[in-house]
Amino acid sequence: MAENEKSWDWEIGPKPAKSLSAIKSIYSYRHFHSALVRKEFLLNYQQTILGPIWIFFQPLLTLIVYVLVFGRLIGIPIGKTIPPVLFYFSGIVLWNFFSDCFAGISNTFRDHIHLYSKVYFPRIIVPLSVLTTHFLRFLIQFSMLVILVIYFISFKGFHVRFGLDLLALPFVFVGIAMISGGCGLIAALLTARYRDFVNLIGIVIRLLMFVTPVLYPLAAVKDSLKWIVLINPLTPYFELFRYALLGEGTINNYALLYSFLFGIVILIISLSLFNAKSSKLIDIS
Amino acid sequence: MEEIVLSVENLSKQYRLGKIGTGSLRQDLSYWWKHKVLEKSDPFFYADEDERFIWALKDVNFELKSGEALGIIGSNGSGKSTLLKIISKITLPTKGYVRGNGTISSILEIGTGFHPELSGRENIFMSGYALGMTKEEIRKKFDEIVSFSGIEKFIDTPVKRFSSGMYVRLAFSVAAHLEPDILIIDEVLAVGDVEFQKKCMGKMQDVSHQKGRTILFVSHNMTAINNLCSKAIWLEKGILQKNGTAKEVVKSYLEKFAKPNLPKEWVELSAAPGNDMIRLKKTSVEAVEQSFISVATPVKICCEFWCLTEGFSVNINVRLNAEHGECVFDLGSSSVQAQRSIMQLDVVIPARLLNNQTYSVSLTVVKNHAEPIFEFSNCLSLDVQDERQDMNYFGAWPGVTRPVINNNLRIKELLENDQTKKISSWNA
């Protein structure tokens, strides 16, 4: 029988499949992806009294703490025009998106090894679902921010001109998603191999927050220390976010380009590493 | 000739032994530094290379045609699960290829994708998606899945509140409704109660016999393999031992692995069990006309004694005890006049009397039909293997014996039409 000439639908060999064919199969698992997202949402609010209201409650509580501690007690200067509530809340919402994504994706293998080791699906589906989950949660919190802004404009005499700047917002979301996704995937590969990184990542996220303009504007940083904040690719996005929504922020086109390129590069590197390494890591997770 | 849908070629998988994780970052970095950067070979690193790796599979080859059911047997750690994991794309082989046509689904555990906090309904979808079903497929079969599992009332309860039996029922029901071209099943039949096992096996047979689906099936239950599978392979330490029809492969596996009922012999009189009147010399138990004992073979028990006394009549009580010590039968042998001699006792237990379990034999030597001289308790044991044909039930067969007893079930007379109507109106 001429078996060599026979054509096969699929082949499993020692080398991982090409990324391209992996992308194709993602689409056929889209329902699995949405089921995972749904599961995350359902799980968060099982057996709680407030249920889904926690999505709103949690950043509000953080906001109160930040306004009290950083605004009243320590008194970090946050600029001239933006009300502190809006300043802190915009920072919290965007930062939560980044840090939740990063932390969530970095735990991909640890949290889902029971799935990974028992059934095949495109491995990227799980981190992708984490990203989607946090993005949806972010959108909900972002709409809260928008409501707060409208409230301040209507009742507190806060002035901001909305214009084409608002078009920059989706760019910010995509940019943050790329960086958190890329870094998260690399962290996931490292934590799967070396558990040491589980502890490290929490600390890294906390440290990163201090060199990102979450609680302070870039303009308030001393010139001698500014470079530390500027090499952080997240900085331009935070500034752009506040500029577009609240009308105050330091914008630099080169910095934005740097952040964007950083995001693209880290995403490409992390995706190809993930494709190459994930099935080996499942053996040892 | 039917089309080949799965081809496994020189498949090998190597695993690294020992601790991976703690401390290995340092090791890996120093390895990387020495090999990749300095390009030196580290003699200490290579010295124990062979011991640090193990071949879970080594050069496995086989092919499977459309509609065939392949049983995979082997003792624990023989590479069965690794093979299934590679074919279901969970892990990559170190060498070799698997090629196939058509969709493939694998059930390597019961309840893949289940989450305890979610309701039964949510979990059906979750698990269905994880196993590769589409939304339409699950929707279409949802009612069927629920009614197969028999937990309609609890479908909106979180599965963490399910009893373990209910959990298993629901999980298997989802898996049982998968319809891939190639289905991979790993030892999932060892779950659930007898009733549900029957249901599962029936479903499996439907799938394999009627729908012409290709199945790979790992099990330790030889009867299930024999009845569900047309072909089988036997793996041992990652190496393919035998590939052939299920009957052949199961038989040679049992010949090798059915606990050998080795004959025991005491060469020195003083070391042999017994007392100064009688001592045991040799015991053996074997199947007649076959190398292993199964429910279908007669069993021959043979014992030799040193008789060290004389002057009275002696006979031997043979007592067969079942697994939990219940007496199956107690047989008094014919008697013989004791002489200084070697005595031999032969007992042949007919075929189709014993069940598949482990029995032990106790012998009591009796003087003049009244006074026990010595009891050799549990001096030999026999393992009886199962053998069933044309049967849908593969669970443990109850009973200390499994005799063939003639019986007759038939329709005695038909009911009149108005009689049946009366009965159904009572029920309503």
Image (spheres, helix red, strand yellow):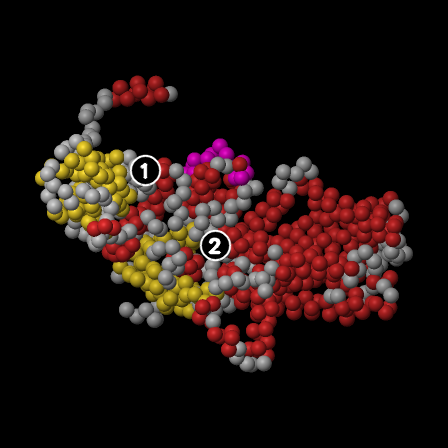
Is B195 colored magenta in this rendering?
Answer: no
Q: Amino acid at mark 1?
A: His
- In the image: residue B139, left or right of residue B249: right
Q: In front: A39, or B316?
A: B316
Residue B290 in the image: state x and y as whole percent.
19, 52
Residue B336 in sight in this render: no
Determine which residue is flagged by label 2.
A119
In the rendered structure, the residue with mark 2 lies on which chain? A
Q: Nearer the viewer, mark 2 or mark 1?
A: 1
Q: Is residue B205 above or below residue A9?
A: above
Q: Quadrant of the C terminus of chain B?
A: top left
Q: Residue at x 34, y 71 (%)?
A: A4
Q: In front: B43, or A266?
A: B43
Q: Quadrant of the N terminus of chain B?
A: bottom left
The circle drawn on residue B324 is 1
Residue B156 in the image: state x and y as whole percent.
53, 36
Q: Residue at x 31, y 43 (%)?
A: B394
Q: Is residue B63 above or below residue B212?
A: below
Q: Amino acid at mark 2?
A: Val
Q: Residue at x 58, y 81 (%)?
A: B38
Q: In front: A25, or A183?
A: A183
Check if mark 2 and mark 1 are on a common chain: no
Residue A146 in the image: state x and y as whole percent.
77, 49
Q: CA distance from mark 2 to mark 1?
A: 40 Å
- In the image: residue B73, left or right of residue A122: left
The circle drawn on residue A31 is none
Graded by Cα atoms within 10 Å as few (under 14), some (14 to 19) or many (20 or more), the crowding at tag 1 reads: few
Is B151 colored magenta in this rendering?
Answer: yes
Boundaries of the magenta span: B147-160
Q: Hey, which quadrant is residue A98 in on the image? A: bottom right
